[in-house]
Amino acid sequence: MLNIIFMIAITAEAMSGALAAGRRNMDLFGVALIAFVTALGGGTVRDILLGNYPVTWTQRPEYIYLTLGAAMVTLLVARYIHRLYRLFLLVDSLGLVAFTLIGCNVALALDYNIAVVIMSAITTGIFGGILRDILCHRTPQVLRHELYASVSLVIALLYLALLALGISETLTLSISFATGIILRLAALRWHWSLPVFSYPAGRWGR
């Protein structure tokens, strides 16, 4: 199940990257690059940080074809995508949860400390979006909008806690997945966010 959702998630993330590139009036290469980075950047950064070589997508070329294909399809259907906005939010939430759980599993398989496992989960979940926004010259959305990175943290903690209690992996995945989706959609519905730190310009420097 997780693999299927992962494929859906990287498709959706690639499309979101292509749309972000389009808002910045990038050429076809730029659209393809941003789509690729958005979809696979989190896993790539995770693998590099954990020393998990070869990087996952280099062994699964179908991921490359999928992300680039999604980017090209986005060019064709961009004018209609606003009608699918709610669906994109749902798929993006699925992607966040799937990427987070995959990040946990990769670090656990490599026998890392729990703190590293949690950071691996969060990195996998959110770093593609961070790279997308940096390349598109905007403040990363995951750091300033409704709960997103925090959801990734909660999912990772819940998943690890359930495993520690000896609950079966299938049930643990199901509970973690459902909790993550509900929390993310609730944050979108009621605009839940963390407190914002605002420091006025002009005090103690620029």
Image (cartoon, grey):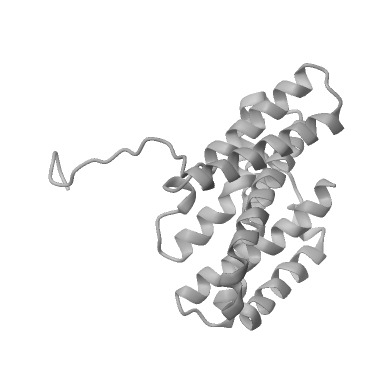
Q: Is residue 77 left or right of residue 140?
A: right
- At horizontal 76% and vertical 52% (from top left) the residue drawn is 54
Q: Nearer the viewer, residue 74 or 65?
A: 74
User: Residue 104 location, x and y as percent?
Assistant: 71, 36
User: Residue 89 location, x and y as percent?
Assistant: 60, 56
Q: Is residue 115 left or right of residue 20?
A: right
- At horizontal 69% and vertical 49% (from top left) the residue drawn is 94
Instruction: Quadrant for residue 203, please give it.
Output: top left
Looking at the rendered structure, the number of numbered marks drawn on it comes to: 0
Q: Tell me if residue 88 comes above or below residue 163 in the rendering.
A: below
Whether residue 198 is visible, yes or no, is yes
- At horizontal 80% and vertical 65% (from top left) the residue drawn is 61
Q: Nearer the viewer, residue 85 or 201?
A: 85
Whether residue 110 is visible, yes or no, is no
User: Residue 87 location, x and y as percent?
Assistant: 65, 60
Q: Tell me if residue 39 comes above or below residue 71 in the rendering.
A: above
- At horizontal 52% and vertical 72% (from top left) the residue drawn is 21
Q: Nearer the viewer, residue 79 or 105?
A: 79
Q: Is residue 41 left or right of residue 23?
A: right
Q: Tell me if residue 57 comes above or below residue 104 in the rendering.
A: below
